[in-house]
């Protein structure tokens, strides 16, 4: 039966429309995968030499194990955003005399063949080989290697449990933040030394291979729990049950002060709050807002003043970029109906513009505490906010007139490439690299004040010519109206 399932999966994969859509994006993802393979191979073969040179007085094997906790934690977070749950077209199979347990075992077994389970092998196996060549006993290293592989599989099934709980409760990535934050907090505040616990456990397994039974037992527990979850949901009529949800109403009367664009703003706000992709995108605002904390606390970046503009544009324009680049694809599900109404297209676009401008102002105000790292950073963020309002908002609205891909609002936002085309990649250059390049060049030739003034002048110029720019952009949308209707009527 498993052989028959594999045959069906092979035919489904190569007969689907997968090869006909986003070929360039698929090639890019393959190249990215090969890049990570090479990086992990380099890490595996070079880690022993790096550790010996950096910490000559310590055992490199023990040092490597002391950092395994952070590797496992990072692996869990990356899987949540990148790894898809194992799926299979099971409905036709449920009408056949096939045991549900067989189907579930196949689906879970299929997940073990995921790229994320193979990727660590390109680092773990070379590192094990280098340790054995350096004089470590193979009887100690091989059990350690298998223990790491088992932990990787445990993380694989733990991720599915978190994904299933998040989807059931509609909590986006909140459970992941709780799990990862709790584990990291326990170690950081020395409540439970997770780093030492994981490292010492792996060293203990290498010294006494019988301890490998403990991670094997954990793997069996996680596997059986996933098996139970999937089997309980594997019924033909499970998709026929009507989902009862409580309607969450919000007071949007404040939007009436914006006049004739108020109805469109209300629709956009409801769309953002009620759909999974837009909601998870909004929750990612915290990442954009705190983006500067990856750089500013480090003294080396405080001297790179050209980075201030890049971080400022990204931090204050996170919503503008992520929401604006898919205008009007957010409304692709009912775009045909929307265009059949007696509405002015300029009002429709102006509501999007006002929403993006409001987000820039709010994110700048929330980012004012960056002044802790210096007044120059706050001033650069202010200039970047003005640039976002006057320039990037118009650039991204114009780029939206070239969108031709439908978006499924029921999928998560993080690392979701649906609706992404060449426009989204090309538009990144004027949005991010242009202000950073201009800021850095003027800062180097003239000075910081002149660079800030340049961004502000460009932003103010865009604000002054806003009406003319909007008229030009609206005309472009009207010219592309029927092309977008036709494109949104098709499945990607």
Image (tube, rainbow, N blue to C red):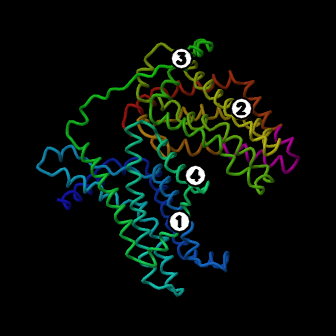
Can you name the residue that lies furthest to the left here?
97
Closer to viewer: mark 4 or mark 2 = 4
* Mark 3 vs 1: CB contact within 8 A: no
Earlier residue among tags 3 and 4: 4
Identify the residue under disc 3. 251
The span picked out in magenta is: 431-452
The x and y percentages for residue 406 are 43, 35
User: Which residue is at a point 49% across and 60% down the rendered structure image?
Assistant: 72
| Disc assigned to residue 365 | 2
Q: CA distance from mark 2 to mark 3?
A: 23 Å
Q: CA distance from mark 1 to mark 2?
A: 39 Å
Q: Return the residue nearer the eye: 346 or 6.
A: 6
Residue 437 is one of the magenta-drawn residues: yes
| Quarter of the N terminus within the rendering | bottom left
Q: Is label 2 in a helix, a strand or a loop?
A: helix
Identify the residue under disc 4. 185
* Mark 1 vs 2: CB contact within 8 A: no
Q: Return the residue nearer the eye: 488 or 165.
A: 165
**Mark 4 Cα shell of 10 Å, populated few (<14), some (14-19), many (≥20):** some
Residue 321 vertical position relative to residue 216 in the rendered view, above or below: above
Q: CA distance from mark 1 to mark 4?
A: 16 Å
User: Which residue is at a point 51% across and 70% down the rendered structure image?
Assistant: 200
The x and y percentages for residue 218 are 36, 61
| Disc assigned to residue 68 | 1
User: Which residue is at a point 51% across and 45% down the rendered structure image?
Assistant: 178
Q: Quadrant of residue 91?
A: top left
The x and y percentages for residue 223 are 32, 57
Residue 89 is one of the magenta-drawn residues: no
């Amino acid at each position: 039966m498993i052989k028959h399932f594999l045959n069906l999966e092979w035919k489904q994969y190569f007969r689907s429309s997968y090869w006909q859509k986003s070929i360039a994006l698929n090639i890019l993802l393959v190249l990215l995968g090969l890049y990570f393979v090479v990086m992990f191979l380099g890490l595996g073969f070079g880690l022993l030499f790096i550790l010996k040179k950096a910490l000559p007085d310590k055992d490199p094997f023990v040092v490597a194990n002391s950092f395994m906790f952070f590797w496992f934690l990072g692996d869990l977070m990356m899987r949540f955003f990148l790894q898809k749950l194992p799926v299979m077209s099971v409905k036709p199979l449920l009408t056949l005399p096939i045991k549900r347990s067989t189907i579930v075992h196949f689906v879970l077994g299929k997940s073990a063949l995921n790229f994320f389970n193979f990727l660590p092998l390109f680092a773990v196996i070379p590192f094990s080989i280098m340790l054995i060549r350096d004089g470590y006993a193979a009887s100690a290293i091989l059990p350690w290697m298998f223990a790491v592989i088992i932990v990787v599989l445990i993380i694989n099934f733990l991720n599915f449990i978190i994904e299933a709980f998040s989807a059931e409760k509609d909590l986006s990535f909140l459970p992941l933040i709780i799990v990862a934050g709790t584990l990291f907090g326990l170690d950081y505040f020395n409540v439970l030394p997770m780093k030492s616990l994981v490292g010492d456990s792996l060293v203990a397994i290498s010294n006494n291979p019988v301890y490998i039974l403990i991670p094997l037992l954990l793997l069996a527990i996680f596997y059986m729990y996933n098996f139970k979850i999937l089997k309980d949901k594997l019924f033909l009529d499970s998709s026929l049950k009507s989902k009862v949800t409580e309607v969450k109403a919000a007071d949007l009367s404040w939007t009436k002060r914006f006049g004739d664009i108020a109805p469109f703003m209300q629709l956009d706000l409801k769309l953002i709050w009620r759909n999974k992709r837009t909601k998870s995108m909004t929750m990612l605002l915290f990442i954009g807002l705190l983006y500067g904390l990856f750089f500013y606390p480090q003294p080396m970046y405080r001297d790179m003043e050209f980075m201030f503009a890049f971080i400022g544009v990204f931090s204050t324009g996170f919503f503008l970029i992520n929401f604006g680049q898919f205008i009007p694809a957010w409304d692709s599900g009912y775009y045909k109906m929307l265009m059949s109404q007696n509405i002015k297209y300029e009002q429709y676009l102006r509501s999007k513009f006002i929403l993006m401008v409001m987000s820039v102002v709010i994110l700048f105000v929330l980012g004012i505490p960056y002044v802790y790292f210096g007044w120059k950073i706050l001033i650069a963020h202010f200039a970047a906010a003005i640039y976002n309002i006057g320039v990037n908002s118009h650039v991204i609205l114009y780029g939206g007139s070239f969108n031709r891909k439908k978006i499924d609002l029921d999928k998560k936002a993080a690392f979701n490439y649906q609706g992404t085309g060449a426009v989204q990649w090309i538009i990144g250059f004027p949005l991010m690299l242009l202000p950073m390049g201009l800021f850095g060049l003027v800062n180097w030739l003239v000075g910081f004040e002149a660079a800030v003034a340049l961004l502000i002048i460009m932003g103010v110029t865009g604000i002054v010519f806003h009406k003319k720019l909007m008229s030009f952009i609206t005309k472009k949308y009207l010219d592309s109206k029927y092309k977008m209707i036709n494109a949104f009527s098709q499945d990607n």
